[in-house]
Image: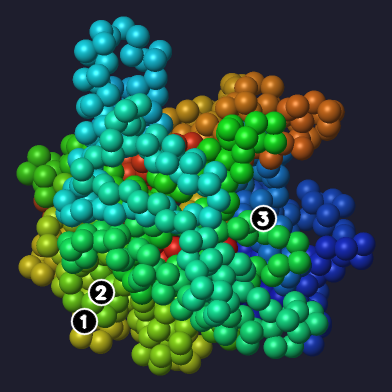
Amino acid sequence: MGMKTARIDDYPIDSTLVKLTIKSNDNKYWQEQLPNLLEAFKARPLIKPQEILDNPAEYGNLDNVENWNKDEYYIIHTEGYKYKEKEQKGRGHGHHIDTGFSLKERADITSKVLQFLDGVLIPDKAMECDIKAPTGKKIPLAMRDYEYLRTSLLPSALKKYSDEEKQQKIREKQNIIADSIKRTTKDNQIYLFIIYREEHTKKLLYQQLRESLLLQEGDEFPEYLIVQDILIKDFENSEDAKKKNRTLFDEISVSGLPSVNENFDEEIKKGHNKKRQAWQKFLKENVLSLVNNKNNANLFAIIEIRKTQVKGIHPKQSIRGAIREACVLENINSQMLQTVKPTQNDDTVYSAKTKGRTLNAVLDLTLRQTGTLYGLPSEVYEIAKIPENIVSKLDVIAFCRIKRNNFIDKTPLQYAIAVRLSAIGTVDILLPNYKTWIPYHKAGIEIGKLFHKARKKDDDSLKQVQMKGGDLVKFASNTLVNHLKNPTIALIEAEVWRNKRSKDGNNNQAWFQLQNENLLEQRDILNFSHVSDHHQYQRDDERLNNLLGLIRLRSGNETPQYVTNRQEWDEDSETKDFTQLSGFIDETVPELLHYFSIGRIPKTQKKQDEKKARNLRKIENEDDIYAANIAYKHQQMIEMLLFFVRRDLKSKEQIKALCRVLHYLRTSPTYTKGNIRHPYPMHLGNNLIEDMLCILGFDD
């Protein structure tokens, strides 16, 4: 609502609009007792909500009349607005335009609203399209995924080549994988252990591992990779294991579930520790004993576990956290895989779903957990039109943060790291309290060891995994000022890092510059004046010469919902999702270019990417395969806002190029269905922390 005259006689006012919330039930009323407050001050009362809802045109100045002297009331809805009635239960209504509505319907709704509020609600100009992302043969290897390599060797793709040429093509693709993995693991020997209990798990893992490396029948594993399988039963059936009741494979035993067992959490803690110790003993005796020159070897293991969701078994009884903890304490990167079973009809055949999850486990361990891209990021930077003198040296650094409300004993967790992707494809991690960067495939083990100490209630470790706002902003400032080796683009999310002052009065709890109201005015400085040992840095400060610019990222409810293929809202044209990674520029605020990134439609939605599905209406027949019972989820916009740009890169084209780098890096070799939500370095960092959360009692 807004008002033209003072609500209390002779009281000065600032004519503006104020959000009022209606309690939504049969008897609608204003929420938060505002009418009672106005009555207490003997102020003009509000109109009853039902009267406004029954006749909204009567109470809103829709014609923009100059001499309108009454209060104004407008019924509004903001995309992504979460309503308090549901927020109190830990969730919101979310988007009022539900997933069953197509993009065309969203556009139609917006068009009608604009007609109804003509002259009141005025849309901005359409965003400017950025250059097209590379497609076809122009896509650099660093933007390719595993599916591209696999399909390039299918018989249909190789049929035009001679037998000799086919073998050459196969070797080329195999070398791409080998070279990329060796590059990220520093050419050290890789040991990959398949630790299994059921023969089918081992069998399919070998098949999918060979598939992931594009090995043909008769090919040996490459020299850099030593693969060995270890049967868990061999250890469990030993006399020593039987005496000590060491059952590695079974879930943590308890005397009853929480509903009937008041000692449940204590039993889980003790059971977790026993299970971790048993696995450590197993790893030392049966795995590490097989490794030559442990100091120059990278150790990885795929470990079979039982089905994680079983009736009568509580999630906290999962052995996943105990296994992960045992592995990191023995310097092993690990990946869990639920027991593999063949189809019911044929003991030699596995379903597509089973094959898929097994391949995903292999790719996650060999590619994502090593931070591997198939090609050089410098090729991506070049296509993004980064200046030639920077391309071969450019680093991209992302600040990553994970927060959970509680773990063991309801202790809150918040932890952050910085991830650096180099032009030559190596990935390194900077951890808080560390003075040097460490390789990505070693950083997970370091984080896991920290979480292990925190689980044991080590005071210093607990403090490190419970970072406060001040810890976050100091970590960001230290990284930017003291740890940039090469020309660098830095990426940070707005959420949490920009939070307002804490209730205890401390003024160091966030990086306030990231708030909207501050960025425009402070776009050419780094304002860490509230951080100890830091101050406000100017753009010409030599310590920050390597920092080309910072990109603030926003997503989810903070970004607009898009409607594609329309220059004007009233245009009568079909709308559909983007089939390619697409970028847009909003120049509403010329001093701060806003870059928007939209991923391509996931392959899993291809069946819905048809005219009948896109123009879906909620009232269609439920028996129709395209009816509204299908949750049609459209891609979301990610906003990138660049500031603190180095003075020699101030042109519009150069600024777009810096944003374009992050836009193009929304790809991962392990994700073949579409684009990852965050740029690759941030994707890697978030996953690295989440890998280790099970040590602290989370098993998402």
Q: What label sits on residue 94 in the rendered view?
A: 3
Question: x%, y% of residue 511?
Answer: 35, 74
Q: Earlier in the sequence, mark 3 or mark 1?
A: 3
Q: Secondary structure at mark 1?
A: loop
Q: Earlier in the sequence, mark 2 or mark 3?
A: 3
Q: Residue at x 16, y 51 (%)?
A: 187
From this view, report whether residue 645 is shown above or below residue 624. Answer: below
Q: Dot 3 surroundings within 10 Å: few (below 14), some, or many (20 or more)?
A: some
Res. 412 visible in picture: no
Cβ atoms under marks 3 and 1 closer than 8 Å: no
Q: Distance between the Cα atoms at labels 3 and 1?
A: 40 Å
From the image, tell me which residue sits under label 2: 477
* 233 left or right of 104 in image: left
Cβ atoms under marks 2 and 1 closer than 8 Å: yes
Q: Distance between the Cα atoms at labels 2 and 1?
A: 8 Å
Q: Nearer the viewer, residue 325 or 148?
A: 325
Q: What label sits on residue 33 in the rendered view?
A: none
Q: Identify the image quadrant of the N terminus.
A: bottom right
Q: Nearer the viewer, residue 297 or 567?
A: 297
From this view, report whether residue 164 is shown above or below residue 370. Answer: above
The three-letter code of the residue at mark 3 reads: Gly
Q: Residue at x 35, y 71 (%)?
A: 284
Question: x%, y% of residue 308?
Answer: 63, 59
* 23 left or right of 355 in image: right
Q: Which residue lies most toward the right here?
A: 26
The three-letter code of the residue at mark 1 reads: His
From this view, report whether residue 29 is shown above or below residue 509. Answer: above
Q: Which residue lies most toward the front here?
A: 239
* 197 left or right of 309 in image: left
Q: Nearer the viewer, residue 136 or 532?
A: 136
Q: Dot 2 surroundings within 10 Å: few (below 14), some, or many (20 or more)?
A: many
Q: What label sits on residue 534 in the rendered view?
A: 1
